[in-house]
Image (cartoon, rainbow, N blue to C red):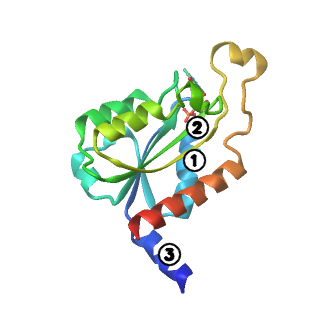
Amino acid sequence: MLLSVVCELLIMAKVLLVCISIHHGNTLKVAEGMTEAVDAEILKPFDVDQDLIRRYDIIGFGSGIYYGRHHRSIFSLLDKIELKGKPVFIFYTSGAPKIPILNGCDEALKRKLRKKNAKIVGVFGCRGFSNPGPLKLVGGICKGRPSEEDLEKARKFVMEVVSSTIR
Ligand SMILES: Cc1cc2nc3c(=O)[nH]c(=O)nc-3n(C[C@H](O)[C@H](O)[C@H](O)COP(=O)(O)O)c2cc1C
């Protein structure tokens, strides 16, 4: 009974994943994994506007981490739209693990979303294969990431976050 109610909530919820994944498609893999768990649409930041935002119950913003923050196109989009209490979540892949004491890589996006009065309901991050510059010489780091285990965690995360937000 409880399970069927949760399933219904997951189907009813309108979920948008705003995702830009420029290095190796790592974050797109995570977004695609999430769509296996909830019915969600994936769009690039350039293809999103205020009208579209209004049509969704919950919105995930995700990209790889480049120089310590999410991709600039997500910030440019947020400059143009209002979120006014809209439930949102953050997702990302990064070459390095998050080190909170050094101001974690999701902090800039969290600050921006708070300024837009969004309601942040969760953050999902995992490692992603990376080989820019000199890292090519050693074959890159985080080979095989995101892994199937990462994608399973992403599916679980999005199910929990959507069902607890839309309840
Ligand atoms: C130009 C560039 C800058 C990067 N900067 C960081 C960084 O500051 N911190 C980090 O952990 N990873 C960094 N990475 C690694 C990426 O965050 C990682 O590979 C991510 O999974 C890429 O996601 P994508 O394939 O979705 O673009 C960087 C990668 C590139 C190409």
Q: Is mark 1 on a helix, strand or loop?
A: helix
What's the mark number on residue 93?
A: 2
Residue 167 showing in the rendered view: yes
Res 25 visible? no
Q: Which of pointers 2 and 3 lies earlier in the amino acid sequence?
A: 3
The CB of the residue at mark 1 lies under 8 Å from ligand 1: yes
Q: Earlier in the sequence, mark 2 or mark 1?
A: 1
Contact? badges 2 and 1 (CB < 8 Å): yes
How far apart are the two marked residues, 2 and 1, measured between alpha carbons? 8 Å
Q: Quadrant of ligand 1?
A: top right
**Mark 3 sits near ligand 1, with its Cβ under 8 Å away:** no
- Residue extending farthest to the bottom is 1
Which kind of residue does numbered mark 1 sit on?
Val
Label 2 neighbourhood size at 10 Å, few (<14), some (14-19), many (20+)?
many
- Residue at 41% x, 71% y: name it: 167
Task: Tell me: is circle 2 under 8 Å from ligand 1.
Answer: yes
Q: Which of marks 3 and 1 is in front?
A: 3
Q: Is residue 104 left or right of residue 128?
A: left
Q: Residue 30 carries which label?
A: 1
Residue farthest front in this picture: 101
**Mark 3 falls on what kind of element?**
helix
Residue indicated by mark 3: 6
